[in-house]
Image (tube, rainbow, N blue to C red):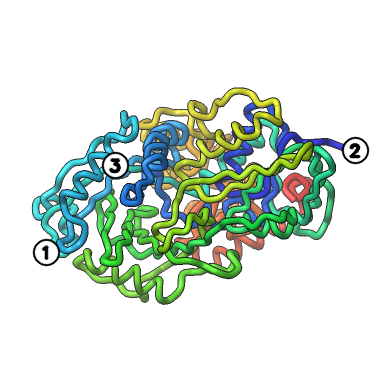
Amino acid sequence: MGVIFDLAICGGGINGTGIARDAAGRGLSVVLCEQNDLASATSSASTKLIHGGLRYLEFYEFRLVREALREREVLLRMAPHIISPLRFVLPHHRGLRPAWMLRLGLFLYDHLGARKILPPTRSLRLRRDPAGAVLRPELKFAFEYSDCWVDDARLVTLNAVDAAARGAVIRPRTRMVSARRDGDIWRLVVETAAGMREILSARTLVNAAGPWVADMLSGVVQANAAARVRLVKGSHIVVRGMFEHERAYIFQNADGRVIFAIPYQDDFTLIGTTDQDYEGDPAAVHASEEEIAYLCHAANDYFRRPIAPSDVVWSYSGVRPLYDDGASKAQEATRDYVLELDVPRRQAPLLSVFGGKITTYRRLAEAVLDRLSDYLNIGPAWTATAALPGGDFPYDGRDQVIADLLGRHSFLDKSWATRLVRLYGTRANDILAGAKRREDLGVDFGHDLTEAEVRHLMNNEWARTAEDVLWRRTKLGLRLTPEQAARLGAWMAERAAKDGSLTARTA
């Protein structure tokens, strides 16, 4: 009959990998299948924030905001290499939300969560503060508050890496074709990118397929109940840096939405997001001309220097699978997660995940395992105090890790060392192990992306294509030329073809 896993997970986004990590650490045997690369959909298309969700207070999402606020510092301690504190400037715009409402919301924001690390809200006079220099002169007053920035795709991958280290089987590029109950066991037919099929067996099944959660229920599982899912599209643009300081902005729009303008990858500014209902294939989602124009116009209401669609160097879009709570507007639909458990009498359990946000993924994973505790022998919760791979240093210790790396490898410059630590933390030492000079790291594909780093990503993080490396494992797609990217892709394809065991480990 073969191996029977305790838990099978469909979906390699933040929810799926977070559940896999937690479950593996509690002694469960786990297999995770993802039809594409890890974090290839919604989980790499976020606004890159670990935040409480200030605007959700308007919709009375107090439970969600409280949980998210508490999680900010938990995640910061877990992953200080890929998560950073970030101060947000919220200008008061006459004619929109009044100052008293903003002040009240920020008071709640400061006090709903158990904030210990992040500093509190303060008021700014924009004519005196450097943050006001790039804003339109009619904007005179602002509030400044705390949240955190995150490399979203790295967060997904590191959860998968840790899950695998604890015994989970991680299967990117493996599509779940069908799932049927055989009494108290699930029989799962999966298919690799090469077209090979096999049958996996599991005692429980978690549907964490993100935008495909409904397709999973209706097509793969062939469940009778209709999934209450609302797909909401969010798009972002990236332009050359709009400001030199390290704070972000949150801007109110006349239509009730808010957008963020965030310092990104040192030399750029990330602006987003939009919120609109989406119908169609989630794999085909992209930022439309109308959305790009909307984001430029919204930014131009605040910045002195206007931007146009021609200034956009990159855009991306994702589809959030929100639980359909009947909200009339996309921006009003709940971002809270909803778990639906289906357990026909004496049959194998199926748990489906709707909604959620990156900030609360760890708590979502705990809630999933709590719901499954009647059916599996699950150990105690543990992730709140366990660092993700490479994050085994104090939350404010990144500069010291960079200094230590520079001390060990004299051929590095600070920007290179900083990039490596921001991605890999203390595991940057694994990439550079044994290197005495730059040439020891092999081929240089551009912007300090070396053969040693790419080998690490292929061997340890399931990277297979140039896109995996340039847009999810790193963000060097913003910097490499098309010719450099093509050279990287050719090298990776050649290496994968030569190394059969590499394909077998991650097919």
Q: Can residue 403 be seen here?
A: no
Q: Residue at horizontal 83%, vertical 36%?
A: 3
Q: Which mark is residue 299?
A: none
Q: Relative to 462, does residue 315 appear above or below in the rendering?
A: below
Q: Is residue 142 visible?
A: yes
- Are the residues at dot 2 and dot 3 in contact (C-beta closer than 8 Å)? no
Residue on which disc 1 sits: 138
Whether pointer 1 and pointer 3 mark residues with C-beta atoms closer than 8 Å, the reply is no
Residue 471 image position (x, y, % from top left): 52, 57
Q: Residues within 10 Å of mark 2 (few under 14, many from 20)?
A: few
Of residues 501 and 253, the one drawn nearer to the viewer in this rendering:
253
Residue 267 position (above or below residue 364): below
Q: What is the x, y in percent for residue 281?
A: 60, 68
Specify the quadrant of the image occupied by residue 91: bottom left
* Residue bearing mark 2: 1
For marks 2 and 3, give the CA distance: 53 Å
**Residue visible at 34% across and 68% down in the picture:** 295
**Helix, strand or loop at disc 1?**
loop
Label 3: few (<14), some (14–19) or many (≥20) C-alpha neighbours in 10 Å: many
The image quarter in which residue 346 lies = top right
Instruction: From the image, state whether disc 2 or disc 3 is nearer to you.
Output: 2
Q: Of residues 124 and 202, which is closer to you in this image?
A: 202
Q: Residue at x 63, y 38 (%)?
A: 20
In space, the residues marked 1 and 3 are separated at their CA atoms by: 24 Å
Q: How many circles with numbers are drawn on the protein?
A: 3
Q: Disc 3 marks which residue?
A: 146
